[in-house]
Amino acid sequence: MGAQSGDQVAKDVAAHILAKLLTSRDLKNVEEEMKSFLSFLLNAQTAKTETERPITSLGFSAALMHLLKVQELLQYFLTSNGMQT
């Protein structure tokens, strides 16, 4: 992985902060926003190359880990990806 531009670092930090903000709220107030952001993250990783992705793999991992701390969102993630729990 090469050096990141300042713009790319800012996008990664923004994704991380958004994930932290969403998980700090009561789930019933932000459930749809959490699911939407999770979908964005997963779709962003389908780009063929790292440079085509809106955030890097590191930014993706950090944001995803924060979101999946929420049990209900983890359950949604698993079932929407065809995994049985």
Image (cartoon, grey):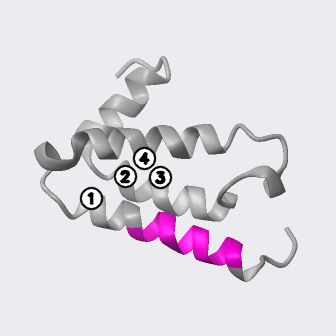
Relative to 30, does residue 85 appear above or below in the rendering? Answer: above
Mark 2 and mark 1: span between their CA atoms?
6 Å
Q: What residue did someone put label 3 on?
A: 64
* SS under mark 1: helix
Q: Which range is magenta?
A: 7-17
Taking the spot 84% from the left edge, 48% from the top edge, the residue there is 49
State the image coordinates of residue 24 (x, y, percent, origin top left).
21, 64
Residue placed under numbered mark 2 in the picture: 67
Amino acid type, residue under disc 4 in the picture? Phe
Other-residue count near label 2 (Cα within 10 Å), few / some / many at <14 / 14–19 / ≥20:
many
Residue 23: mark: 1
Answer left or right for 5 relative to 35: right
Spatial distance from mark 1 to mark 4, Cα to Cα?
A: 11 Å
Instruction: Point out residue 65 in the picture as x, y percentages from the top left corner.
Output: 44, 56
Say which residue appears at 59% left-offset and 64% top-offset.
Answer: 59
Residue 3 place in picture, x, y as percent? 84, 78
Task: Kindly report the distance in space between the C-alpha atoms of the residues bearing marks 4 and 3.
Answer: 9 Å
- Which picture quadrant has residue 10? bottom right
What is the three-letter code of the residue carrying label 3? Leu
Residue, disc 4: 37
Disc 1 or 3, which lies upstream in sequence?
1
The quadrant of the image that shows the C terminus is top left
* SS for dot 2: helix
User: Can you tell which mark lies on residue 71?
Assistant: none
Label 4 SS: helix
6 with respect to 36 (left or right):
right
Disc 2 marks a residue whose amino acid type is Leu
Closer to us: 61 or 46? 46
- The quarter of the rendered structure image containing the N terminus is bottom right
